[in-house]
Amino acid sequence: MATPAEIAAMRRALELARMPDAPLGPNPRVGCVLLDPGGAEIAEGYGRGAGSRHAEIDALRAAGDRAVGATAVVTLEPCNHTGRTGPCAEALRAAGIARVVFGQADANPVARGGAEALRAAGIEVEAAPAPAVELPPDAEAVLAWAVREGATNVLRHADARHVRISVAVNRTDAALELVDDGCGRTRTEERPGADDGTGLAGLAERVARVRGRMDAAPGAGGGFRLAVTVPLEAVS
Ligand SMILES: [Zn+2]
């Protein structure tokens, strides 16, 4: 379980991820807060776009030696690949971080695996997929639905105007199924009898109410992927 201090730090990390000088793409915007063992903030960091240092590295630099024994609270699973920057999982280990709490698993097949690498290095790792930012009831319902349906990745990428919730549902026994509409497109439909008011119909309705949009596409392993985009004013 993430502690109250860690949840508060996650909210701050999400704010950092949305700093004005953090560009919108192509990389996900990420924020990181380092806490001492008592839960007090040591340092903050965030990514400033492709090729710049990642949020974790930014925070570690600010912390210096104080990172030893600290907890890193990151909005996205620390990366485990060497791109233009080194892997953050290794940097966190080398800096002496004792615990990592992250908000979203990394869906990028190249960068994922950071959590496993950290655990293998003896670092306590906590995935905190529960809403880390205060979302309005509609968006909360979207996340609650995603968790209940067995979604494995719930990504929230905020840009200047939207929050994007990308949900990979890998379970094939979910209350939703993919349907070919005969015109080369796929969409999700509720399985008959599965509607308890929180399934797709309810979700689509909630998304429409806040003038968002929802797209569906086949995912890996027989599941599917939903992309829900909600205007920022609906969540802030
Ligand atoms: Zn990284």
Image (spheres, rainbow, N blue to C red):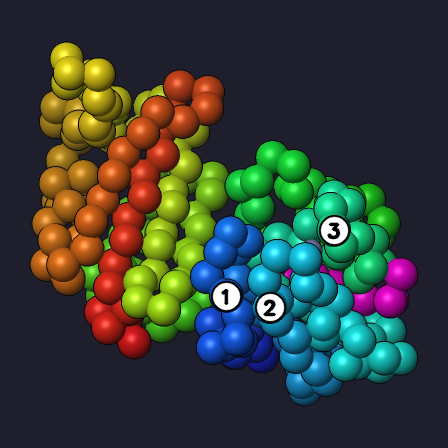
157 shown above or below 178 = below
Side (left or right) of 4 relative to 66: left
Q: Which residues are magenta?
A: 94-103
Task: Determine which residue is flagged by label 2.
Answer: 48
Q: Residue at x 72, y 74 (%)?
A: 59
Q: Earlier in the sequence, mark 2 or mark 3?
A: 2
100 shown above or below 202 = below
**Any part of residue 30 in sight:** yes
Pick the residue in front: 231 or 176.
231
Task: Determine which residue is flagged by label 1.
Answer: 23
**Any part of residue 17 in sight:** no
Side (left or right) of 105 relative to 205: right
1 shown above or below 32 = above
Q: CA distance from mark 2 to mark 3?
A: 13 Å
Q: Do callouts 2 and 1 mark residues in contact (Cβ within 8 Å)?
A: yes
Q: Secondary structure at mark 2?
A: loop
Task: Determine which residue is flagged by label 3.
Answer: 84
Q: Amino acid at mark 3?
A: Arg
Tell me, yes or no, whether the highlighted magenta stretch contains residue 99: yes
200 shown above or below 126 = above
Q: Secondary structure at mark 3?
A: loop
Q: Amino acid at mark 1?
A: Pro
Count residues near mark 2 (Cα–Cα under 10 Å), then give few for <14, some for 14-19, many for 20+.
many
> Where does the N terminus fall, quadrant-wise?
bottom right
Q: Could you say where residue 118 lies in the image, as x and y percent from the top left?
A: 77, 50
Location of ligand 1 given as a quarter of the image? bottom right
Q: Earlier in the sequence, mark 2 or mark 1?
A: 1
Q: CA distance from mark 2 to mark 1?
A: 6 Å
Q: Could you say where residue 4 lies in the image, as x and y percent from the top left?
A: 54, 77
Residue 123, image quadrant: bottom right
Count residues near mark 1 (Cα–Cα under 10 Å), then give few for <14, some for 14-19, many for 20+.
some
